[in-house]
Image (cartoon, helix red, strand yellow):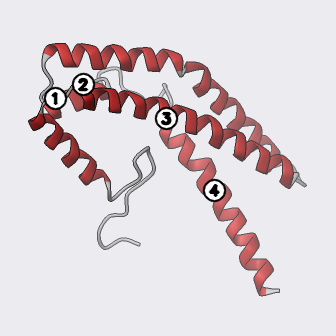
Amino acid sequence: MKTNIWRQGGVVLALVVLLAVPGWSVPDERKLDDKRPEPGLGIAKRLGLSEEQKKSFMEREEKIKLDLKKEMEEVKNLESKLKEEIKKDAPDKNTVNNYIKEISAVMSKIQMKRMENLLELKKSLTPEQKVKFNEMLSRREKRPFFGGFEHKPGRK
């Protein structure tokens, strides 16, 4: 009996995490401040990119942003369907699992596209910029690479 309770608790916890994490990585346009700079500009500044490098990187960022618009909408749509299924008195476990799998597949596509741009950027970096790039990655080792959350020291 205890095993079933733990298993059910694990399933609920997994659902909560899977519902929350994609929401963190897909920005809600209503929450974004219009004054907030493009994320790529922060990377460009930290790496000290030349104007040419910055232009090339930002053009790829913009293209990816447009290319991924469909996928972002698909994630929102699937998350909405998943939430509606979970709200039912007797949600179908297979349907819930299928929505989670579909969301994960689309999120993987999004992450791969973003990673492609970072890899393209890395090819154009000077040796000094590559050192900064690797330092940026090292700082991110303590938290998930794409979204998520970081545990602060002293917090559990």
Q: Earlier in the sequence, mark 4 or mark 3?
A: 4
CB within 8 Å, label 2 to label 1: yes
Q: Position of residue 152 (x, y in %)?
A: 32, 64
Q: CA distance from mark 4 to mark 2?
A: 32 Å
Amino acid at the residue labelled 2: Leu
Front tag of 2 and 3: 3
Packing grade of label 1 (10 A; few <14, some 14-19, many >=20) is: few
Residue receiving disc 2: 41
Is 11 above or below relative to 146?
below
Is 76 above or below relative to 142?
above
Q: Earlier in the sequence, mark 2 or mark 3?
A: 2
Q: Which mark is residue 25?
A: none
Q: Residue at x 63, y 56 (%)?
A: 16
Number of marks drawn: 4
Q: Which mark is residue 112?
A: 3
Amino acid at the residue labelled 3: Met
